[in-house]
Image: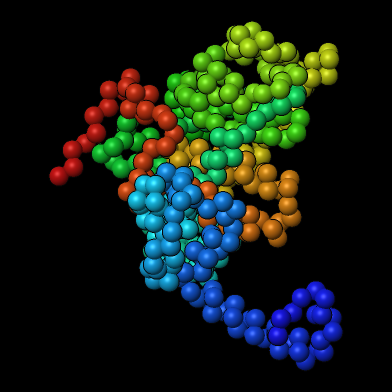
Amino acid sequence: MIIDNNNIYDLVPSQIVQIISKLNDALKVIKERKQTISKVAHFEKHKHNCPYCNGTNFIKYGHDNGVQNYICKECSRKFNDLTGTVFAGTRLTYEQIDTFINCFNDKVSIRKTVKRMKVNKNTVYLLRQKMLDAFKIVRENIELNGEVEADEIYRSINLKGTKRNNMPRFSKPRTSKGTSTRGISNHKICIMGAIDENDSMFLQIVGNGPLTSNMVKTSLTPKMKNIKKLITDCKSSYENEAKNQSWNLKQVKSELYKDLEGNSLANINSLHSGLTTFLTPFRGVSTKHLQGYLDWYIFEKILNYTCEYDQHFNSVLKTSVTNSTNINSLNMNDNFSGLDFNAIYADYNYIPPTLN
């Protein structure tokens, strides 16, 4: 029986109960299938093209474990709906993927997620890194318009996950007062942040040490489109680039909440404060993977602005099967920060111990 909105209300209760029972049985079977996520990807993609050459001239080319394959007539490469996405080559059931995304949204630790999914730790770690990489598209495509607030924050370098023979410096003892050099030294990373009047925002690692005009030029300038006003603190780095770009620059002194014209940095300060809260559950994020967590934070902020919490699962799922990622099992532990830690700590003259 085909049911639509025109006749569903003509059913008697027993018929509806029967349909619900059949749907629940079907849902259970579908969630246990490994090829279900491929069908979800096909359903969610508005445009189907070759992930290698972006061509649209392709044909069906058999199945692998129930997953529909295609072959591109332009580059002759074989692919499916998951190629290049978070769940490419996955052997997980949809039920396990459902569990992963719910744990991801709730910021459940990798160890606890492993227990819930009943998989290897490396599987969960890889999925998280691929998911973070899939969020980068938001930062890459963001545009700032109207009134923009910009400011930078600094964080100590975290070498968590670095093997002993790859350390650029000696291991520092943990203390309650911290171990980094005080002040803004070259051993601190600089994160540029900005938010406009429409709540478009971005955070990006721009280098180490104090903010420079070149950091502003390479990170902030490409995002600035139709700017009415740029509000910053009094650093000369902003002044130099504002002069070059003819921006209407308003600078607020650090000891003031507002200037005489009512300009303030309240929104960007709130964004930075929220980042600290966001990162707290992870108990230290390695600097080499920090940009992914910055992108995750912005992505989550956008979700909070645009949809209800119960819709977050669908949004993250859609992102995972439509956005591309270059992370795989071979490079998931690589340094994606853009920083050369050996160069930063060159003044330590540190020689890693030889492992026997």
- In the foreground, 60 or 208: 60
- In the picture provided, is 134 more to the left or to the right than 198? left
Q: Is residue 298 above or below residue 87?
A: above
> Can residue 316 be seen by looking at this rendering?
no
In the image: residue 4, left or right of residue 187: right
- Residue 93: x and y in percent read 47, 70
134 or 159: nearer the viewer? 134
Residue 164 visible in the displayed image:
yes
Q: How many marks?
A: 0
What kind of colouring is applied to the model shown?
A: rainbow
Q: Position of residue 174 (x, y in %)?
A: 43, 39
Quadrant housing residue 193: top right
Q: Image point 77% across, 92% down: which residue?
A: 14
x and y percentages locating residue 262 in the rendered image: 83, 19
Residue at figure coordinates x 35%, y 52% from the top left: 77
Q: Is residue 228 left or right of residue 49?
A: right
Measuring 55% from the left and 31% from the top, which residue is drawn there?
204
Image: 152 above or below 159: above
